[in-house]
Image: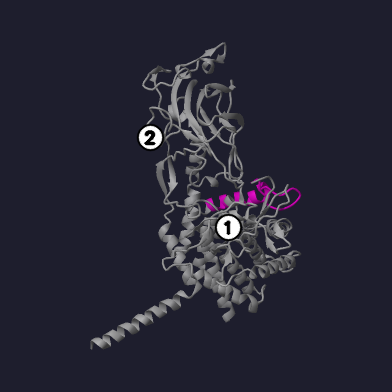
Amino acid sequence: MKLIKFFVFLFFTFFGLNLFAQKQSSPIEYAKLIGDKLIRDTQFKYNLSVFNNNPIFNGLQQVNFQRTYGISTPAVAYAYTTIDAPNAMELDIEFAHNDGLKIWLNNELIYSFHGNKKINLVYDERNIELQEKCKFKLNSGKNTLLIKSESKGLEWGFLMQPPVSKGAVGDVVYPAIGLKSVPYITESISKISNWLVIGPFPNLEKNGKRIGLDTEYPPEKELEFGNMYTGIDQKVTWTIPKIEILGTLINPLQWGTNYQWNYHNGGVAWAMQVLAETTGETKYDKYASNFGNFHLDGIPFVEYQVRTLNADASANNEIINPKLLDFTLAPSLPLIYKLRTSPNFQNRDKYVDFVNKMIHYARYDQLRYPGKSLFTRTSPEKYTTWVDDMFMGIPFLVQASQYAKDKESKDFFMNDAAQQVLEFKTQVWDEEANLYMHAKYSQRDVKLPHWSRANGWAIWAMSDVLMYLPKSHKSYSQILNQFKTHAKSLARYQNIRGFWPNLIDNPSSKDEVSGTAIFTMAMARGVRYGWLNKKIFEPIVIKGWNALKSQIESDGTVHNICMGTMCSEDKNYYLNRPFFDNDTHGLFALLFAALEVENMTNTLKK
């Protein structure tokens, strides 16, 4: 009897496992594994945490006297810190301030301004530009910095930053900043603030002019702790600026493994919408709705952090007046797609308002190459063409053409999308290699490497255009030929394991998931729509999908995804890029790959 039970147990165990294996062989089931993990892991909530104090002088530093002292009358105050340079160096420091200001570096007055002034922050693609500049001649080791700021009342602050990097790749050595090396300052203080402040002191008027800036108060003579000085209406001593509480993301980990407002997280939400349509399971669409609602409902909070607290790197800051397609059109894809496919839902008015702003941005505000329709960037230098922007911009143009209500707008956005594809070819297509370079500078004739994911952005964008562009359109045949040429070229580089390397034409480069997923997706789409030869490309798609499956764990974890990458002329930069698990650059590509392989398989069965 026991023996019979044992064989029955073996039979059902084997049968159950076999059923599980068969079920898991479906691409859509793998997509659901990934989707379910995303649902489990993503809370779409803010943590409240203390402002993160950065002891490296590689970004914006600020002293907000207004929030520290909370007064609206004319006043004077001081701020003190040290800059620890690894060697003697000169830095062209950018800064901004309200009203009068004096700066002493190593006890030498290097800047003085009398009068009224407003802080005017200019937001560029990846940085903020401040209106004033001053050369800081730093000695090797510790340098002291004393700021004296006067205010006529109301706004009152000081900001500064080192020379702005536009995203060029290289090893930049930044000095340290803060109070760590200041005698009699404990580590508990230097961990939470880089600055000491003292004030407010009187800012009196004489003959119709404020004289506080030129009135010598004790902090100009000594840095002495434990002393009390006469302020405006009470005794004052050295303290630290008001420490702010910020809303941060929960468990953000690396850049690509959080739910920040950006293109790859918008891509995940978009993929989850399509997964919901395919499976009929509303939980995936709920994830996408949570993404949209979290970001749109949170805009006033983000504006407060960015505008009032000057926390320029705070969570989701890029949703506030962004100047880059990564943070405008691309993350808006799930929003415009929802408007197109769902007639009624909560928050629809907010979606309409935001998407309309993005449509206006696409047509009138996004930087374009002089004399062309082509999307371009100011980083790392002005009018750099990134092949990434084929995905960052073109799929949104396609969606806008379908969403628009009037024929003129429909035609404009579809024609723009088609023209973009052709103009990108003139800039970043390498005729010799039949591959896309990652980027092209406007002033320097340099060939950049053929990065896998960048080529993925190109073929993805072309496939999106081909799905919606009428075959009678004047550009259809050119775009189809370019799609075929690119697909045929890419097919040469699929390795024996089914992957494409991170640097496509460098066999020693690592197998990489996001590029492999996008190529698999685009080729599956090409087979399904008849753009590509089924006999040639179906085996390539299946081989690619089998490779991708090997990187998906039963809990939905996905391995070997290259992190977000700037552009560089140096191949070693790409060869040495870190790989992460569950980076959303790869997750949304893999979700779309699973969906398209499933679609291709079902179409070919008919």
Decide whether residue 172 is among the magenta residues: no
Q: In this view, does 510 lie to the left or right of 442?
A: left
Please give the residue where the numbered disc 1 appears in the rendered image.
575
Location of the C terminus by quadrant is: bottom right
Closer to the eye: label 1 or 2: 1
> Looking at the image, is 75 positioned above or below residue 527?
above
Location of the N terminus by quadrant is: bottom left
How does the figure colour the protein chain or chains? Answer: one colour
Most foreground residue, 556 or 509: 509
> Looking at the image, is 457 positioned above or below residue 540?
above
Answer yes or no: is residue 599 visible.
no
- The structure residue drawn at horizontal position 46% and vertical position 71%, both measured from the top left corner, is 29
Q: Quadrant of residue 465?
A: bottom right
Q: Where is residue 197 in the image (x, y as percent from the top left)?
A: 44, 26
Which range of residues does the magenta coloring cover? 350-379
Most foreground residue, 309 or 445: 445
Q: Position of residue 507 (x, y in %)?
A: 60, 65
Q: Residues within 10 Å of mark 1 (few under 14, many from 20)?
A: some
Answer yes or no: is residue 426 visible.
yes
Please give the residue where the numbered disc 2 appears in the rendered image.
187
Decide whether residue 351 is among the magenta residues: yes
Q: Where is residue 583 in the image (x, y as percent from the top left)?
A: 50, 58
* Amino acid identity at mark 1: Leu
Q: How far apart are marks 1 and 2 (CA)?
A: 39 Å
Q: Which label number is shown at residue 229?
A: none
